[in-house]
Each structure stands twice: as C-alpha cells, then as structure tokens.
Amino acid sequence: MATSAAPSLPHLVPTRPLRPLPPTDGPDGMAPRVDGLAAPLLVGRPNLGDRDRLMARIAEMLDRRWFSNNGPLVQEFERALAAHVGVRHCVTACNATIAMEIAVRALGLRGEVIIPAFTFVATAHALRWQEIVPVFADIDPRTHNLDPDAITRLVTPRTSAIVGTHVWGRPCDIEGIEAVARRHGLPVLYDAAHAFGCTHRGRMVGGFGRCEVFSFHATKFLNSFEGGAVATDDDALAEQMRLMRNFGFQGFDHVTHLGTNGKMTEVCAAMGLTSLEALEEIVAVNRRNYLAYREGLAGITGVEVIRYDPVERNNYQYVVVEVDPDACAVDRDALVAHLHAHQVMARKYFWPGVHRMQPYRAEQPNARMLLPHTERVAERVLVLPTGQQTSPAAIAAVCALIREAIVVGAPAAPASH
Ligand code: T4K
C-alpha cells in the first residue's frame, strides 16, 4: 500500500530507556517500520464511503453550479442527520468549533461556563473566543467524562451553563449533570464531537440538553472533509443558529442578527451524505478493529483497552489504552515513544489537559489543583490507529510492539535462590 508523507515527529523522550527492537529497514532511510506494513500508521486516517457515489454527487453539484449557501446537498444532509439522530433539527456548519461558537452565542451564554479540561481544546476555545471563561471541572477517572459532583463545587453566580463532552463517544453521566443543572437553573450543551451514532440508555446522542454539537472532521469516523452540526429539538434555537451562521441574513439584504460565516459547503455535504450511507459498514470495521486490539492486548498487566457499554450503540472510533505505570515497567510516554520509533503514530489525546494549554495555563495557573483525575488520566492514555485503513495485520503488529515494549522494558526479575 502506498504511504503518505511521514508526519513530523514530536520530540518524545522515554522516561525509562527501552532496549530497541531489532530494526527492519524503513523505506527511504526513514525510521524502522513495522515489518511488512504500510508506514506510518496514523490515528485519524479518514474513512471513505462509496467513491463513485461521491464523485456522482460532486459532478451533479458542478453541473448545478450551486456550491454553498444552504444548497440542496446541505439541506439533504441536514434532513438525513436529523432523521438518523431522531431530532427536529441538525444545523450544519463548516466545522464543530464554529458550530459550538454559534450555539454558545445563540444560547446567550456569558460569564463562566463549566467544562471538562479532559477534552479537545476546541471546547474551551469556542467559549474563550467569545470572552467567556471556561471553568474546568474534574472527570470521573473510570469514564473520563465530567463528574457531576465536581461541577457542583464550581457553580457561582457567574455560571451561565455546563458543557459536557462525550469523550471517546461514551456519553456523559447525563442524568447526574442535568440534576446539577436543574438545581442551579443552568442550560446544558454537549460537545458530542466523538459521539455521532452512539446511544445513552437506548436514546441517540444528539437529543440531550439544549443542544449537542457533532464534528464531521476528516479524522472522525463519519466525515464531511470538514464539518459539524448542532442537533436540537428547539425550533427557535435552530432558527436563530441558521441566521447566525449566515451573517444574520433573513432574505435578501435584510440582516436581523449578529452573525458569522459558518456555512457548510456543498462538497462537504456530498462527502457527509456519502459517509452517512456507509455508516454501518464503518462502525463494523471499527468494532472489528477494537475487538482485535482487545484480544491482542489481553493479559498484559497494566495495559487496559477502555470498554464500551455492550448494550448501547457505539461507533468504536477510538481505541484508547490506559497504561498504569505502577503495574507495568514502562509508562505511557515511553510506550508512545517506542511506537513512534516504529512509525506507529499513537496519540496522547488529551494530554496535557486543556488547563495546561494557553491561554488557560496563564489565566488559571491553579486550575490543576482541582483536576487530579484529569491530570492522572492525561498521563496514562494513548489512542491507537483504527478505521478502514487499519488492517488486522497492522493491529497484530501494533499489539506485538506493545507487548514487547512492556516485556523488554520490565526490570529484571530478582534472582531467586
Ligand atoms: N470537540 C472535541 C471533543 C473534538 O475532539 C474536536 C475535534 C472538536 C470539538 C472540534 O471539531 P472540529 O472543529 O475539528 O470539527 C484532530 C482533529 O483535527 C480534530 O478535529 C479532532 N477533534 C482531534 C481529536 O484530532 P489534531 O490536532 O490531532 O490533528 P492532526 O493534524 O494532528 O491530525 C490527526 C491525525 O489524523 C494525524 O495522525 C494525521 C491524520 N489525518 C488527518 C487529516 C486531517 C489524516 O490521516 N488525514 C487527514 O486528512 O486534531
């Protein structure tokens, strides 16, 4: 299989030295690679639906000469998304970050908003971009999602909302969060960037809170190149967001709202529709990969693949491994460095935590004191390659690398006499 250009490697230094595995010569003098496999192996390789369907849609779009501004493909994508999720509206946008900014503004949020620090930085930026202060609440270390008790401790008169992220597609403790929100009269918005196609207690994610925001970025299991959408059952909110994403225009020449340009293009909707048609097939591949990793990594002490609730629908787009440095001889960073050295480009999402990124680090230097679980989880988690581009052979090789790293890195057993 042809390989793409090698990404630039971050400078990772193993905290404990690992004896290098016997190298296999990489192509073009590159780093040693996983023998016989396409390299590098990347997290976030895009999935692709039926290529002919996509090309046909694009050809029709070119013939129509309608490329943006709420075109027929965007409208069709919005109807298909809403039907899939079971909500009245899915308002698409050029990406999830802008979708979130629009939702935040349409909900009239201000002051402080409580969010997790264990999330992608966009969750915080969408608020801070509008001069709203994200206040970071700790997570439940078992689920990696917001802990409702931690939220309660942070509510002040300045709090205007709670934003939960369904990390890895595993829904938040929605009942717990909504109980806190009800007690304090706060709206809840969910960052559902990871959770399209997932259920909570049998109900599709998208229908909870005042609204939920999906991402269809290229790296998401269902992608529209770039894209996002806000799902809601609130007609007035949906209408307001539609206006805001198009400069506030209501008909020709008539601006009734402050707005931005958050529109999804027709070519993105063509990709989104084609991806949606392939959803079941992509989830099946992700599930197969996830189970192969679970099997391949079974029995390695200190290495756990996170679980998805088998009675719910999951998209399995993230294969997440937690490394317990007290139970095995290497820590997460050493393991990631080892995988990178063999061109398996595992990622450390969401290290070091949003509270340690700028401008939050400078603005809230003490935030970490309230985030012990966030800090601990961020030190232990790594994400492995999956999706259509990851073959069973690649997974077996990655598991072998991890197994070998743990064994090679283990301190010598004390001699027994
Ligand atoms: N909320 C949450 C919880 C999110 O996770 C995200 C996005 C958002 C909000 C915001 O959604 P959007 O505004 O993006 O719709 C990547 C994605 O860019 C980002 O969308 C995603 N989360 C995040 C988890 O991952 P980076 O900084 O890791 O991107 P990068 O350039 O390092 O690429 C990731 C991997 O994907 C690499 O291994 C390369 C590979 N890749 C990427 C692209 C774009 C490909 O193989 N092909 C491609 O076309 O953020």
Image: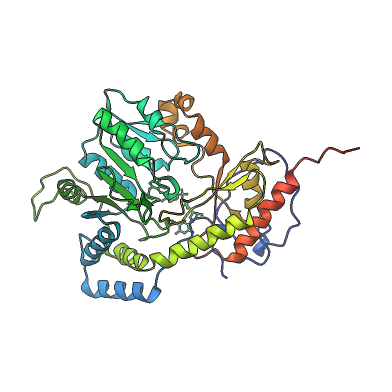
**Percent x, y for residue 155?**
32, 26
**Percent x, y for residue 163?**
33, 38
In the rendered structure, the answer to whether residue 324 lies left or right of residue 417 reads left
In the rendered structure, the answer to whether residue 333 lies left or right of residue 66 reads right
- In the picture as drawn, the residue positioned furthest to the right comes out as 417
At horizontal 77% and vertical 40% (from top left) the residue drawn is 411
Image height of 346 relative to 334, above or below: below
Camera-nearest residue between 413 and 11: 413
Quarter of the image containing the N terminus?
Answer: bottom right
At horizontal 64% and vertical 46% (from top left) the residue drawn is 335
Quarter of the image containing the C terminus?
Answer: top right
At horizontal 43% and vertical 27% (from top left) the residue drawn is 362
**Percent x, y for residue 176?**
35, 36
Image height of 351 relative to 229, above or below: above
Image height of 364 relative to 266, above or below: above
At horizontal 49% and vertical 34% (from top left) the residue drawn is 374
In the rendered structure, the answer to whether residue 310 lies left or right of residue 156 reads right
